[in-house]
Image: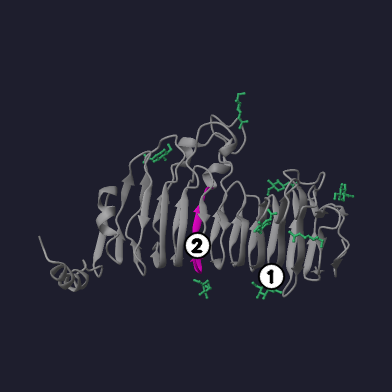
Amino acid sequence: MLAWTALVALVPYVLAAPASSDCTGTISSLDDVADAVQCTTVNINSFTVPAGETFSLSLLQGTTVNMQGNVAFGNETWSGPLFEVTGDDITFNGNDYIFDGGGPFYWDGLGTNGGVTKPHPMMKVEISGTMTDVHVVNSPAQCFSVSNPAALTMSGTIVDNSQGNLPNSKSNGTAAGHNTDGFDVSANDLTITNSTVINQDDCLAINRGTNLVFSNNYCATGHGISIGSITSNVIVSGVVISGNTCYNTQQGFRIKTDAAATNSTVSNVTYSNNKATGVYDYGVLMTQSYPASFGTPGNGVNITDISFTGGATTIETNSSATMVAVDCGEGSCDGTWDWSGLTVSGGKTGAIDNCTVITGFTQ
Ligand SMILES: *[C@@H]1O[C@H](CO)[C@@H](O)[C@H](O)[C@H]1NC(C)=O
Ligand SMILES: *[C@@H]1O[C@H](CO)[C@@H](O)[C@H](O)[C@H]1NC(C)=O
Ligand SMILES: *[C@@H]1O[C@H](CO)[C@@H](O)[C@H](O)[C@H]1NC(C)=O
Ligand SMILES: *[C@@H]1O[C@H](CO)[C@@H](O)[C@H](O)[C@H]1NC(C)=O
Ligand SMILES: *[C@@H]1O[C@H](CO)[C@@H](O)[C@H](O)[C@H]1NC(C)=O
Ligand SMILES: *[C@@H]1O[C@H](CO)[C@@H](O)[C@H](O)[C@H]1NC(C)=O
Ligand SMILES: *[C@@H]1O[C@H](CO)[C@@H](O)[C@H](O)[C@H]1NC(C)=O
Ligand SMILES: *[C@@H]1O[C@H](CO)[C@@H](O)[C@H](O)[C@H]1NC(C)=O
């Protein structure tokens, strides 16, 4: 038996000789992951993740990830996620390589509202740092779920679910892809920029968080740029939506709060320099009747300080679309709503209910 003093004497040597993380780990199959994440450089080669398993990276602080090939996922009806990454101060270089979710295998026009179980979210991102040039094709349903632990910038992301716009044998003539949200955000200090989403649901959906920037992105064929839907007991505050383009989307810009939600706030949202064309439902929709677009609003969520300023936001809608509609609960849309930077044309004039604070805009 070792004397206590001998044990104490050993401690410094044990602490002084940790396995070095200053190494490069290479992943060519899931079997390589456990060793690779002991290193602060992780290279990902092209491989197929076995069906029913998550490609999960739990990274050391300061790790750089380099994709060096495309990643595919075996097809199986299960709940996912297909890929998840966690870690602080991460540099994730997608290098324009592709994560292929195998969407056509799952798509039945019903998304996560019915039909077969679809892995979702496809990509669960819980890192701080940067994530650059990651491409995703054919997410089974919702694509990115982002809840970063500290500041994160995602740029050059592509979500291409354009194939889901076509019907297939199971979708009865409707788009086969459904609920394929681009980015679902519950996070603080997040910037999403220079990215592209072609899909069948929200390009961006902010569920909660503060200090969020969505800039210079391109959104096509989905439901446009959204805050919400907002449930009970959440705060969304300090959102900048600027320089984005929506093309052939259901909405341009929307805030949707659940009719039944209580004790939540959405505040300090600024839209500037955005453009939307081919919008076919609502150019701008602020509704507290969700899931109805325009119905019986609740007033348990306060929406304050919503502005279109700092550079024109220009929206052209279809002739059958409503240009602007505001459906607030009594007393729950308040503060400064300076809409002097908003120009909308092409569609029908909508109602503005329970919201008398809009200035600088008449339709
Ligand atoms: C999964 O199915 C889709 C659709 O049939 C296909 O495009 C994809 O290549 C399949 N994935 C794999 C890994 O076989
Ligand atoms: C297609 O039709 C089938 C059979 O009626 C139904 O179960 C399914 O929900 C429909 N799917 C869509 C997307 O409407
Ligand atoms: C986004 O694109 C612009 C124009 O190409 C570029 O100046 C900027 O650095 C990019 N931002 C990021 C975070 O990559
Ligand atoms: C109201 O929401 C906040 C979070 O925004 C939460 O901390 C608080 O507990 C909620 N209040 C009630 C009564 O649930
Ligand atoms: C509103 O949000 C912007 C952007 O996040 C922030 O700079 C500003 O301080 C916020 N204003 C208030 C009054 O909180
Ligand atoms: C409305 O927009 C949709 C989507 O862009 C388009 O397919 C449709 O043809 C347009 N309809 C009209 C009446 O302009
Ligand atoms: C919403 O505003 C009302 C009226 O100003 C206030 O009484 C209530 O506390 C606010 N709710 C939240 C969650 O801030
Ligand atoms: C105003 O809000 C209340 C709920 O707070 C709702 O019952 C009413 O229908 C709203 N008014 C209009 C014109 O929508």
Q: Is residue 355 magenta?
A: no
Q: What whole-number distance in Å separates the C-alpha atoms at marks 1 and 2?
A: 27 Å
What kind of element bears circle 2? loop
Instruction: Answer whether residue 180 is visible to the viewer in this image.
Output: yes
- Is 333 positioned to the left or the right of 195 in the image? right
Quick one: label 1 or label 2, which is nearer the N terminus? 2
Q: Quadrant of ligand 2?
A: top right
> Is 30 in front, or is 138?
30
Tell me the quadrant of the picture where the C terminus can be found. bottom right
Residue type beneath disc 2: Asn
Instruction: Answer whether residue 248 is visible to the viewer in this image.
Output: no
Residue 214, quarter of the rendered image: bottom right
Q: Of the numbered discs in the image, which one, if any, rests on residue 148?
A: 2
Which residues are drawn in magenta?
150-161
Instruction: Give the foreground label among 1 and 2.
Output: 2
Q: Of the numbered discs in the image, which one, if any, rests on residue 206?
A: none
Q: Is residue 340 above or below residue 205?
A: below
Tell me the quadrant of the picture where the N terminus can be found. bottom left
Residue type beneath disc 1: Asn
> Is 107 in front, or is 232?
232
Q: Is residue 164 above or below residue 300?
A: above
- For image coordinates 81% across by 44% down, the residue present is 295
Query: Residue 283: percent from the left, percent from the top?
Result: 75, 56
Q: Which residue is mark 1?
A: 273
